[in-house]
Amino acid sequence: MGSLRVTFVQQDGVEKTVADAEAGASLMVVARTNGVEGIFGDCGGCCSCATCHVYVDPQWQERVGPADEVEISTLDMVSDLQRSNSRLSCQILLRPELDGVRVEVAPGE
Ligand code: FES
């Protein structure tokens, strides 16, 4: 079991905190494994479906870092894009400095 903490704010506003996420896992996989609502990960994490869209809490944006070009072009498919902090959660891999990270599940279609 890992030891990293991740908080997801689900679309209904209910927060789900996972306390035993593994370093190296993507936020999408952590969300799916723990029954977070609204994150589907239809493409299995290969950055092509955008069904794992989240908004990174502004306080965590710098540590999480920006999307790369491939991710940005996939993000362009979503209708609820927020240029400032939209990310695909399959492209955010957990590492120790992200312990405590907080993201909001995007509303979706
Ligand atoms: S799981 Fe498909 S883009 Fe993230």
Image (tube, helix red, strand yellow):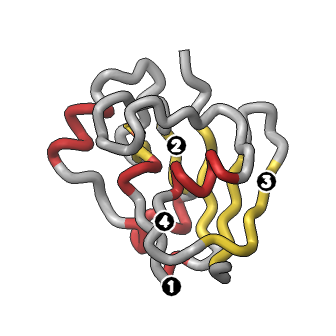
Secondary structure, mark 2, is: strand
Circles 3 and 1, Cβ within 8 Å, touching? The answer is: no
Residue at mark 3: 16
Residue at mark 4: 25
Which amino acid lies under the numbered mark 1 shown in the image of this protein?
Pro
Taking the spot 52% from the left edge, 56% from the top edge, the residue there is 27
Residue 108 pos. (x, y %): 56, 23
Which amino acid lies under the numbered mark 2 shown in the image of this protein?
Val
Q: Which is closer to the viewer, label 1 or label 4?
A: 4
Residue 73 pos. (x, y %): 20, 33
Residue at mark 2: 54
How would you rate the neighbour count of disc 1 (Cα within 10 Å): few for under 14, some for 14-19, many for 20 or more?
A: few
Real-space CA distance between mark 1 and mark 2, rounded to the nearest whole angstrom: 20 Å
Real-space CA distance between mark 3 and mark 4, rounded to the nearest whole angstrom: 17 Å
Question: Looking at the image, is 89 positioned above or below residue 107?
Answer: below
Taking the spot 42% from the left edge, 74% from the top edge, the residue there is 63
Asked where in the image residue 88 lies, by quadrant, the reply is: top left
